Image (cartoon, rainbow, N blue to C red):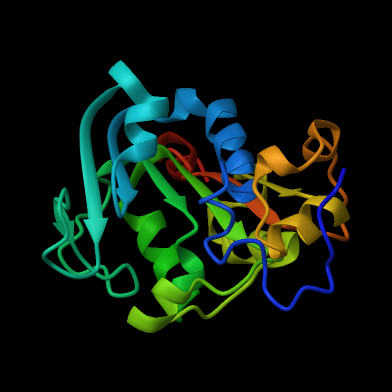
Amino acid sequence: MAWGSFKRPEPFSRKFGSDRGLEICRFYIDEFLRQYSSDIRGRVLEIGDARYTKEFGGSRVSQSDVLHVAPGYPGSTVIADLTKGDGLESDSFDCIILTQTLSFIFDVPAAVRTVHRILKPNGVVLVTLPGISQISRYDMDRWGDFWRFTTASGKRLFETFGDENVTVRARGNVTTAVGYLAGLASEDVPAEALKRDDADYQLLITVRAIKQGADARSSQ
């Protein structure tokens, strides 16, 4: 496949390839949410907008909430800071969709504690974390772009849910990582490369974590 010269001083796209097609990271995110779409049910909280709630939850969703840290964003129903959790009631949500969000929060452990608290017993959080990635200039200029993650940090961050309740996976390989950094879209990459994962080239980390149910807690 002709990707052009990688001696070029500029990437093919500075928008993660979104102006060329479907971003490589979004290809993996879509696969992850499709795999666990049955978790997206009941009262669902998503960050920024309700795109994935609508696409993958459908009629299973009884209430859709959208969280933003600042007021004035269209579609937001909850204004709150996940690191503080003010105004977010405990045991409120059946599912939280937390895609590509924690890298823009400096105190990530505090945000994860809030997520655990506001999930209902047996509720599920579906998380994606950037691994090998460019900076998001939009977020950097507004609230900061602080972190990149690995499967090790993903497991450690969600250990409060209990090891048996957390599933962590790395997506990507050297081909997709190079393509992603160069601003190529998923359509630019060979289909077989998108299916191959290499643990040493973690482009995206996915985490599915289930909050332990009340019955299990009371029996301990």
Residue lying at 51% horizontally and 51% vertically, measured from the top left? 19
Q: Nearer the viewer, residue 17 or 59?
A: 17
How many marks on residues? Answer: 0
**Residue 40 drawn at (x, y percent):** 40, 30
Q: Is residue 87 above or below residue 51?
A: below
Q: Is residue 78 left or right of residue 9?
A: left
Residue lying at 33% horizontally and 80% vertically, measured from the top left? 142
Q: Nearer the viewer, residue 220 or 90?
A: 90
Q: Nearer the viewer, residue 64 or 114?
A: 64
Quadrant into which the N terminus falls: top right
Q: Is residue 14 left or right of residue 11?
A: left
**Residue 137 drawn at (x, y percent):** 47, 76
Residue lying at 73% horizontally and 78% vertically, measured from the top left? 9
Q: Is residue 118 above or below residue 134?
A: above
Q: Is residue 122 left or right of residue 189?
A: left
Q: Residue furthest top?
A: 59
**Residue 197 drawn at (x, y percent):** 84, 44
Q: Is residue 179 left or right of residue 51?
A: right
Q: Is residue 210 above or below residue 90?
A: above
**Residue 95 drawn at (x, y percent):** 37, 39
Q: Is residue 105 visible?
A: no
Residue lying at 40% horizontally and 68% vertically, measured from the top left? 111
Q: Is residue 112 above or below residue 147?
A: above
Q: Quadrant of residue 12?
A: bottom right
Q: Is residue 150 visible?
A: yes
